[in-house]
Image: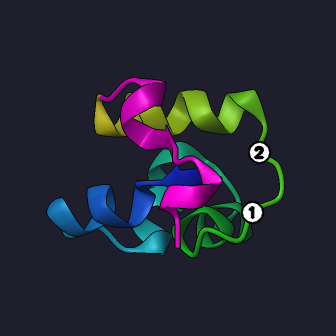
Amino acid sequence: MIKCHLSRLMGERKLKIVDVARVTGLHRNTITLLYDETAARIELEAIDKLCELFNVSVGELFEHVPANESQ
């Protein structure tokens, strides 16, 4: 399972979905799916923009959690 830390990063900076959309130019739906961890796929450009905005690496934005640990 891939865990997305977007909601934590946004919470730490007190950003709303609309704020992230405005700054990155990403569609609100894309950000919402990542925030809710319901996205099935994401474009590399979106990952790049989010990493740039939050000044984090891909490994800080996403984390692989083995299936037996995610329960």
- In the image, residue 43 lies in the stretch drawn in magenta: no
Examine the rendered structure and indicate whether residue 3 appears above or below residue 42.
below
Q: Residue at x 57, y 76 (%)?
A: 36
Q: Position of residue 6 (x, y in %)?
A: 43, 57
- Residue 19 location, quadrant: bottom left
- Specify whether 34 is left or right of 43: left
Q: Position of residue 57 (x, y in %)?
A: 39, 23
Give whichever of 44, 27 is nearer the camera. Answer: 44
Give neighbour class at mark 1: few <14, some 14-19, many 20+ (Cα, 10 Å).
Answer: some
Work out which residue is located at the far right of the displayed protein and give it.
40
Range drawn in magenta: 56-71
Q: Secondary structure at mark 1?
A: loop
- In the image, residue 67 lies in the stretch drawn in magenta: yes
Give whichever of 66, 31 is nearer the camera. Answer: 66
Amino acid, disc 1: Ala
Give whichever of 68, 60 is nearer the camera. Answer: 68
Name the residue carrying label 1: 39
Name the residue carrying label 2: 42
Q: Secondary structure at mark 2?
A: loop
Q: Position of residue 60 (x, y in %)?
A: 36, 35
Q: Residue at x 41, y 54 (%)?
A: 5
Amino acid, disc 2: Ile
Estimate the spatial distance between the alpha carbons at disc 2 and disc 1, rounded to whole Å.
7 Å
Tell me if label 2 and label 1 are in contact, CB under 8 Å: yes
